[in-house]
Amino acid sequence: MERAELIERLNDLIKLDVDAIEAYGQAVKHIKYDDIKQKLLDFQDDHKSHVGNLSALVREFGGEPAKPSPDFKGYLIEGFTALRSITSTKGALEAMETNEKLTNKKYQEAADQPFPSHVLKVVKSNLAQEERHLDYIQDILINTRHPL
């Protein structure tokens, strides 16, 4: 894989994580259970960490990391999350489930790329966190002890 393509793909993941940070920010405003809210804030912190570790890789390869502001797609995701979140905790979680499915898909696609081994290690570590996020959200939606 050429250096320019590697940088572009990593920057796409950075944008995805920035969008997720914004979406979690919208969702937590409408979560009425402290334990769920804290978990979502932890997930938001994971996405912030992903931006940091991916940005370091972009710089390592001589690139400029994507600026940490939502792109057009991010505004759509943030808006979708805000609209769904208004309805209830359940609506916020359903919006985040949709967002995490997209994030998981994009990270899985990245994990299938011929990246250098140390880059692949970071991508796969981030993917494992994304899978954990989705599993938690789906578990809460299906097996919750909270009246959503």
Image: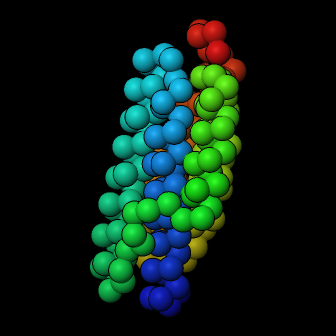
Above or below for 98 versus 63: above
In the image, taking residue 142 as reference, residue 119 lies left or right, namely: left
Colour style of the rendered protein structure: rainbow
Residue at x 42%, y 42% (from the top left corner): 44
Q: Is residue 144 visible?
A: yes
Query: Where is residue 72 drawn, in percent x and y?
Result: 60, 64
In the image, taking residue 148 as reference, residue 46 lies left or right, namely: left
Residue 95 quadrant: top right
Above or below for 144 versus 73: above
Above or below for 126 versus 9: above
Above or below for 144 versus 137: above
Q: Nearer the viewer, residue 27 or 104?
A: 27
Query: Where is residue 139 drawn, in percent x and y?
Result: 62, 25
In the image, taking residue 115 as reference, residue 65 lies left or right, namely: left
Query: Where is residue 2 drawn, in percent x and y?
Result: 50, 90
In the image, taking residue 10 as reference, residue 118 lies left or right, namely: left
Residue at x 40%, y 34% (from the top left corner): 41
Query: Where is residue 43 drawn, in percent x and y?
Result: 44, 39
Q: Is residue 128 visible?
A: no
Residue at x 62%, y 61% (from the top left corner): 73
Q: Nearer the viewer, residue 47 or 118?
A: 47
Q: Nearer the viewer, residue 12 or 108?
A: 12
